[in-house]
């Protein structure tokens, strides 16, 4: 029973996310729409074409970023590491900047066609994230120390951010606004084929992460120990990077750079379960991350009002007090 | 006496242009405890890491004895083994079974029994459920040795296993190493600066001198030849 409360909480939040939203619908209407009878077309559309995909996207994003954060913190033995520490979000941002602001610079009118804009943004973000990851992978063949890799990742991210700044300088106002909106994060644009692609990519990343569990437990005790046990550090790193690209790369490509969850949830899970064994920690982080992300989504919808807040802001405002509590309670953040 | 480690003309260090110690020739046999002595910075840890396969030898070859698998012939215990917070002692020791567990790192019944036996033999059974981060240095050194033992290798290398420990813990670790050599026929090689303890517990000494020579022999012989005096007094 002790371990069942988290999946139960997730289930409750998933249902609540379907029932609550910026458009006020009665519980009976939503219930009827879920079972496909007795509700109007517009309610059916809101529930199945908007709220359901948004809930699934938040679920996938929360799981992916949290599991990714655990792997980065373990690989680098650094409590401050997060899914974006290797520069993935900056790479994705650079891709989106090229697409959004480049298309306006060269006079290509893609910003006006909604589906083309969404798909192009996701594709370019993914390519940017992949390019950064390939660069880090190539460097990891030469760099033996994980700490050197971490510094390289941070430098790559900074270089990408500098290039984004340069592109921004030469862009017009509508393109800048589109880019800024992307950076605020949103779960609302991932439907249909895009949701299917994101689901396949995230599930693949989660499966690889589960396969990494055995080696992650050893890595937590140092690289020398892992090597002594016959583990190839290069192979493990490559598998972790692949999982990171699939997880954080896909979430960033489809939802924008969702910060904070990836760094906060691993610590919250360690605090809740008092167990750093990855056989416990990975599923715990996936469930906790999904709960936090769906809760952030519910709050960002401001149920009962007509406004929507950026999910990135809500996630950060929710997570920061939790982390401060963890630090004050434990006096330290351990790995 | 069965040779478990044969070092032939090995040079160690981090750069071919600047080796730390050159032309090392030595053998190590099962069932014995060998102490590796020498001043700071001479290359003791580098030699241990080279034998453990964590660093490549700059030249020469390191051969394992008969019956040992190339990729599983020695376990290495660093001077300050890293510990993970919120990781139980039992789980920490179990990670040493990495080669033998399934894809998720789960032990079969026999593997679990091996871990329990090692916890018992190393005197840490009562700590099995404790968080590794909450242990004292002495207790965690025992955990690190237990973790090396479950790897089931014929040779165990330890880098200054008694550093930072009080006298009681030093003695208890040294006695444990002696017991492992005698009762389980392991070859034990450990570096140390504690000459008194080494004189008491070691069957052989490898002494690395600033002149670039590696002297090998029993503690009594090393003392008789004045090598220890030259090194420490």
Image (tube, helix red, strand yellow):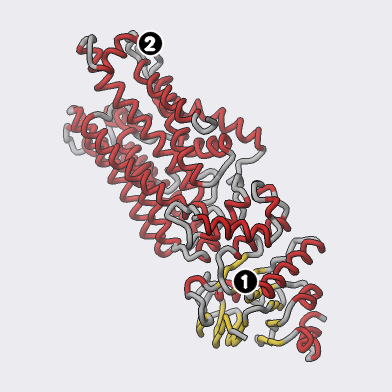
- Indicate the position of residue B112 as horizontal and vertical percent values: 55, 55
Residues packed near mark 2 inside 10 Å, few (<14), some (14 to 19) or many (20 plus): few
User: Looking at this view, is B7 or A247 the one in front?
Assistant: B7
User: Looking at this view, is B7 or A96 the one in front?
Assistant: B7
State the quadrant of the C terminus of chain B. Answer: bottom right
**Which residue is at a point 59% across and 48% down the rendered structure image?**
B87
Q: Up-down: is A184 above or below A40?
A: below
- Indicate the position of residue A244 as horizontal and vertical percent values: 38, 46
Q: Residue A305 shows which numbered tag?
A: 2
- Indicate the position of residue A238 as horizontal and vertical percent values: 38, 56
Chain letter of disc 1 in the image:
B
**Which residue is at a point 31% across and 40% down the rendered structure image?**
A167
Which image quarter: residue A322? top right
Q: Residue B157 shows which numbered tag?
A: 1
Residue A235 visible to an observer of this rendering? yes
Q: What secondary structure is marked by label 2? A: loop
Q: Up-down: is A119 above or below B121?
A: above
Residues packed near mark 1 inside 10 Å, few (<14), some (14 to 19) or many (20 plus): many
Q: Label 1 vs label 2: CA separation?
A: 67 Å
């Amino acid at each position: 029973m002790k371990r069942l409360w988290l999946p139960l909480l997730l289930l409750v939040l998933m249902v609540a996310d379907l029932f609550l939203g910026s458009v006020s619908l009665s519980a009976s209407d939503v219930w009827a729409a879920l079972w496909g009878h007795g509700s109007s077309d517009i309610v059916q559309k809101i529930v199945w074409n908007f709220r359901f995909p948004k809930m699934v996207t938040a679920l996938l994003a929360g799981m992916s970023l949290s599991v990714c954060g655990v792997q980065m913190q373990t690989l680098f033995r650094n409590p401050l590491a997060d899914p974006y520490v290797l520069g993935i979000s900056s790479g994705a941002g650079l891709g989106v900047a090229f697409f959004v602001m480049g298309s306006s610079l060269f006079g290509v009118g893609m910003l006006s066609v909604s589906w083309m804009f969404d798909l192009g943004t996701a594709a370019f973000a993914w390519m940017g994230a992949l390019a950064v990851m390939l660069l880090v992978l190539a460097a990891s063949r030469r760099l033996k120390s994980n700490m050197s890799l971490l510094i390289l990742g941070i430098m790559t991210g900074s270089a990408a951010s500098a290039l984004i700044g340069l592109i921004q300088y030469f862009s017009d106002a509508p393109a800048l606004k589109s880019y800024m909106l992307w950076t605020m994060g949103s779960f609302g644009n991932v439907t249909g084929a895009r949701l299917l692609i994101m689901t396949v990519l995230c599930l693949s990343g989660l499966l690889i992460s589960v396969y990494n569990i055995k080696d992650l437990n050893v890595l937590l005790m140092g690289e020398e120990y892992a090597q002594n046990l016959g583990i190839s550090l290069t192979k493990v790193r490559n598998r972790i990077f692949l999982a990171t690209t699939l997880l954080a790369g896909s979430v960033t490509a489809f939802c924008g750079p969702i910060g904070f969850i990836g760094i906060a949830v691993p610590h919250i899970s360690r605090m809740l379960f008092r167990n750093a064994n990855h056989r416990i920690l990975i599923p715990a982080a996936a469930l906790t991350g999904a709960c936090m992300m769906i809760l952030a989504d519910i709050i960002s919808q401001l149920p009962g009002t007509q406004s929507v807040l950026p999910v990135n802001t809500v996630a950060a405002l929710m997570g920061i007090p939790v982390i401060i509590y963890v630090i004050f309670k434990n006096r330290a953040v351990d790995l | 006496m069965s040779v478990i480690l044969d070092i032939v003309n090995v040079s160690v260090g981090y750069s071919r242009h600047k080796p730390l110690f050159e032309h090392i020739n030595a053998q190590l046999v099962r069932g014995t405890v060998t102490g590796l002595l020498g001043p700071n910075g001479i290359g003791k840890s580098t030699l241990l890491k080279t034998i453990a396969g964590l660093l490549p030898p700059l030249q020469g070859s390191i051969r394992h004895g008969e019956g040992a698998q190339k990729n599983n012939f020695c376990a290495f215990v660093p001077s300050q083994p890293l510990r993970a917070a919120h990781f139980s002692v039992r789980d920490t020791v179990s990670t040493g079974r990495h080669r033998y567990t399934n894809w998720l790192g789960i032990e079969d019944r026999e593997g679990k029994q091996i871990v329990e036996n090692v916890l018992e033999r190393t005197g840490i059974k009562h700590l099995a459920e404790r968080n590794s981060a909450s242990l004292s240095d002495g207790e965690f050194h025992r955990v690190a040795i237990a973790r090396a033992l479950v790897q089931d290798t014929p040779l165990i290398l330890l880098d200054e296993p008694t550093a930072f420990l009080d006298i009681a813990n030093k003695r208890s670790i040294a006695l444990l190493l002696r017991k492992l050599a005698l009762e389980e026929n392991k070859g034990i090689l450990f570096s140390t600066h504690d000459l008194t303890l080494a004189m008491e517990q070691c069957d052989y000494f490898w002494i690395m001198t600033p002149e670039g020579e590696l002297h090998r022999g029993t503690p009594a012989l090393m003392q008789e030849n004045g090598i220890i005096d030259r090194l420490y007094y």
